[in-house]
Image (tube, grey):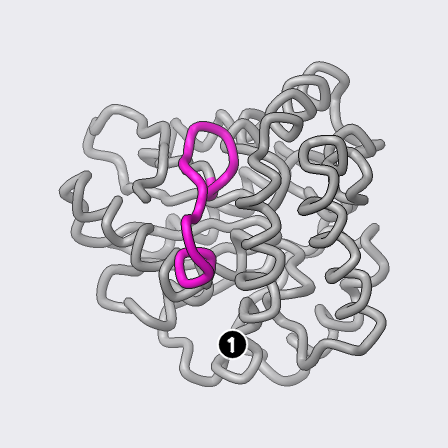
Amino acid sequence: MPLACSADPDMGLPPLLMVHGLLVSRRLWEPNKSLALSFRRIRVDLPAHGDSGSPRSAAEAQPEYLVRQLDALRQGLGIERWHLCGQSFGAGLVLRYALDLPQHSGALVFTNANAALRHDWPDELKEANAKRINALKANGADALRGLPYHPVHARRFPADLRAALTRDADGTDPDGLALLLGEGLPRLSVQHRLQELRVPAMLINGVKESKFQPIRNWLSRMHPSIGITDLEGGHSVNVDCSAAFDSAVCDFLGKVPL
């Protein structure tokens, strides 16, 4: 199941892997075009999203497999080491990539990612996730817009980006998404492994996502080596505060040679 990607031409700039979250596509990074001045951006579509194929089994929807697919992409592009950037579900994947493959990781930037840093799954979250999976299985594409993170509901996105991401989200394979929700999301958390992290890392936190702030504060207390930059955005802080996001990414990654 190869991952579709858009890779900038190799102009000798440091490569930067960029991984989006659920129910969007690699188009999510369009507001961050200024990063192309400093990095060779490799923007991937998650399985079942955009131009990527869907997982064909439970195993293909699990984070360990997805990390191996990201590394296969690295090898196919002839890259020895790259910087990592992830949003939401994608943040969980790049955190795991850095933990599993530090020899191929430069520095790491990630955004708000509740599932990636969750200590456990309360019963109410398990029930809500199960209802979404059942709706996808029963109603297919008609269930997509009922998901709370469908970009049609995004209040802070520019209208043109919201419209484009909505079209992409409407094309998401519902069966593949159900597999990611059932097999990937509950296994995404790396909270118990953060003490193993050996690459420089920074969270760019959207402070307007209130439910993530307790996790942000826990991270600050328990893992002070992971830097935190707070911006006045929400869950998709790279869109809400694109200029400040790009500046923070460049400042941080620019200090870590590949």
Relative placement, left or right, of 246 versus 15 is right
Please tell me whether residue 8 is drawn above or below residue 76 in the rendered image. Answer: above
Callout 1 amino acid = Ser
Whether residue 250 appears in magenta in the rendering, the answer is no
- Main SS, magenta region, reads loop
Q: Position of residue 71 (x, y in %)?
A: 27, 54
Which residue is at 40% across, 52% downward?
A: 84
Disc 1 target residue: 225
Range drawn in magenta? 46-61
Tell me the quadrant of the picture where the N terminus can be found. Answer: top left
Q: Position of residue 13 (x, y in %)?
A: 26, 35
Which residue is at 75% across, 43% downward?
A: 149
Relative placement, left or right, of 121 versus 91 is right
Relative placement, left or right, of 103 versus 45 is left
Which residue is at 70% across, 44% downward?
A: 136
Q: Position of residue 65 (x, y in %)?
A: 36, 61
Classed neighbour count for the residue bearing mark 1: other residues with Cα under 10 Å, few (<14), some (14–19), many (≥20): some
Relative placement, left or right, of 40 versus 218 is left
Whether residue 49 appears in magenta in the rendering, the answer is yes
